[in-house]
Image (cartoon, grey):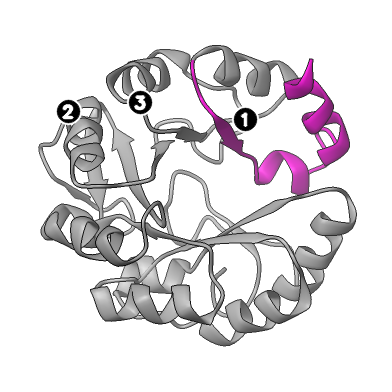
Amino acid sequence: MQDGEVVQLVQGERGTEKTYGDPVEAAEDWVAQGASTLHLVDLDGAFEGERKNATAVAAIRDAVDVDIQLGGGIRTVEDAVGLLESGVDRVILGTAAVENPDIVADISAEYPGSVMVSLDAKDGEVVVSGWTEGTGLDPAEAATRYEDLGAGAILFTDVDVEGKLEGVQTGPVRRVADAVDIPVVASGGVATLDDVRALRDAGAAAVVVGTALYEDRFTLEEALAAVAE
């Protein structure tokens, strides 16, 4: 979400966005089509460090009865706990986890399994602040570290293919999945049902699909059937 609308960016770059309307209407539509989890990202929060789509998130939470995982602009334990207590099921930490790894342990101690650490990789390096700053961290090594700190899952986004609808790279996903025992959710590049299957076969416990669904490359029902094969 950006400026109160559903958007998709190409490789996380502002100015490349395509809009898809009202977040609440989109959420209700995906749930009606069979979604059991909604993956929400406050892009304004990711870029600017301040959650600007909180009203939309609250409206979605009130409108649907499925699991919600939220990232973007969550910078403190207080931010995370407030969201978890308001009904968000999982908080996604990226920049905050890199800058202060202990935040993962602090939140997990009170809410076990509620932290999904977002490792967004560009050219084999974890990037933060809306994918604009390199960290020098290796994604697989970082995943192991956060598992030890109590993370319940890893969200691995391949920025090199994100939003391009040109297919996935399974190698980086497999490497992260092989490094940890907690679930790894793969994101980035999905354009076909074969991409969904390939990420599953690479070890991903789940796949985030955005642009391909909004651009009608396949339906959510078809994607759910593909991973159930």
- Which mark is in front, 2 or 1? 2
Residue at the spot of label 3: 181
Q: Residue at x 73, y 50 (%)?
A: 36
Q: Is 76 in front, or is 198?
A: 76
Residue 103 percent coordinates (x, y):
19, 62
Q: Tag 3: residue type?
A: Asp
**Residue 22 seen by the camera:** no
Residue 218 percent coordinates (x, y):
83, 33
Residue at the spot of label 1: 190
167, above or below 121, in the image: above
Label 1, label 3: how many angstroms apart (C-alpha)? 24 Å
Please tell me in which quadrant of the rendered image residue 13 appears: bottom left
User: Residue 215: within the magenta?
Assistant: yes
Question: The C terminus appears in which quarter of the rendering?
Answer: top right
Q: Which residue is drawn at 29% across and 74% down?
A: 49
Residue at the spot of label 2: 141
The mark nearer the N terminus, 1 or 3, is 3
Residue 86 percent coordinates (x, y):
52, 81
SS category of the residue bearing label 1 = loop
Q: Which residue is drawn at 51% across and 35% down?
A: 188
The mark nearer the N terminus, 3 or 2, is 2
Q: Tag 1: residue type?
A: Val
State which region is magenta.
203-229
Q: Tag 2: residue type?
A: Glu
Q: Which residue is drawn at 38% across and 32% down?
A: 182
Q: Residue furthest bottom?
A: 55
117, above or below 7, in the image: above
SS category of the residue bearing label 3 = loop
Label 2, label 1: how many angstroms apart (C-alpha)? 24 Å
